[in-house]
Amino acid sequence: MVREVKISDLDYSEKPILSIKEYDAIHFVGEQLQILDEDKDLEQFLVNKKIDIVETKKGIRISVGPYIGSAEFSNFIITVNPKFTQLKNIGKLIDYAYDLKDEDILDYEIKFHEEKENPMELIIQLFTNQCKKLLQKGLVKAYQTHQETVPLMRGKLLLQQQIKNQSKFNLNFSCEFDEFTENIVENQILLFTLEKCYHMTSSNHRKSTIKKIIHQMDAEVELKQIGIQDFNKVQYTRLNSQYKKPHELSKLILKHLGLFDFKKQSASFVVPYFIPMYQVFEDFLTKLFEDYYALKIQKQWPTPSWKVNGYPQNIKPDIITYNTKSCKKGSEVSIIDAKYMRGTKFGKGKEDYQIAFYLNDYKRKIGYAILPLSHDPKEDIQKDWIAPNQDLKICVRFVNIDEILDLIYSKEDKSSQISEKLEEMIPIELEIN
């Protein structure tokens, strides 16, 4: 039964704010809840973020999935809040998941006000601070090859182009030369994202800070359109490893915003943004086991396990623990998969078959599905799925995100408590034996 909420019962000034939590469905009742023609592109954008909006005779029915964020329609605003963690902890969750832990990055209690700001503002602030740190240390430079027609000979002469110049009585030289410059893809990604953030943020203070950073960069770095494919061009080495953290945030911002004209916003316009919480949860859980679990784990890369019409199809468990430091094939201990979903939904999307395939592929008998705790006794039920004919067992376990974040960000060292909680979920002795 879908819960009904009357717009007349909501407290708002200009437009009703339709608040809903992840994996929920609400029927909002009100005559003014109409989707206009100019909202159709935005409606399709939300469909791509697992948010379905259906117009009814009484209003609209909204069903949402694993994305949190906000979008403004002509007649109303939709806000999707997290289900498995408190909104005030989203900054900490992203901060830890992407390994941004720096003392001066974010004052969670002072700078984040749930009533006034949204999670995208937190990401923008984290990204802005990372860019400031890079500028303080100095932007990375690299050699770039240029081809130009110049009055003085420089580098290598391009004979074919030079012949054309001479035929046109052009006395300049067509040259190819290497230049040591900051105008490289690592910095171009940052500048493009900063430009987007400048138009997205509603904070005048952040706008001012971002503008200063842009002015420090744009004299040497070209502002150009950046796509996800540009991130694949960056190979992180000892020389540019400091770019990995801000690039992760940049990717999170750019990948999930959609192609909207940010310059057309007014003071009250909410730039549509949606954060893929399943991705953040997976990164959070992976780092948690890296930092606090007794056994070695390794970042997993897709491995071919199927062939379809001769082409390999890859699989990738989220986490594998090993009983050796080298993480060699055959030394696997636990197969663990992060499942960002409600407990009662596990198995209905064939998640059990997926993990069972991992177990067969890695020749293990016990696998684990770790879900976020929702604090609903009906949802958070630990289960053991057993396949007696294959001698396989899948254990469904839950992690309390807010509790873990409180321990991580405690002023005292709570490492042992976190390790104990992980070993309660994934017993080490049981697995080794």
Image (cartoon, rainbow, N blue to C red):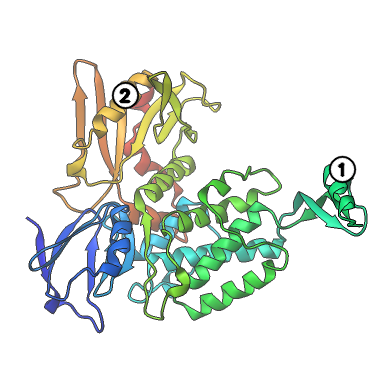
For label 1, the residue is 159
Q: For the residue marked with disc 1, what is the amino acid?
A: Leu
Q: Residue at x 68, y 64 (%)?
A: 135
Could you tell me which secondary element the residue under label 1 belongs to?
Answer: helix
| Residue 86, percent from left and from top | 31, 62
Q: Quadrant of the N terminus?
A: bottom left
Residue nearest the viewer, comparing 432 with 393: 393
Q: Residue at x 46, y 44 (%)?
A: 287
Residue nearest the viewer, comparing 230 with 173: 173
Vertical comparison of 377 with 80: above or below: above
Q: For the residue marked with disc 2, what is the amino acid?
A: Phe
Q: Give the mark count.
A: 2
Using the numbered discs, state the Cα–Cα distance from disc 1 to disc 2 in whole angstroms: 60 Å
Q: Earlier in the sequence, mark 1 or mark 2?
A: 1
For label 2, the residue is 357
Residue nearest the viewer, comparing 262 with 38: 38
| Residue 42, percent from left and from top | 32, 63
Q: In the image, is 120 to the left or to the right of 187?
A: left
Q: Quadrant of the C terminus?
A: top left
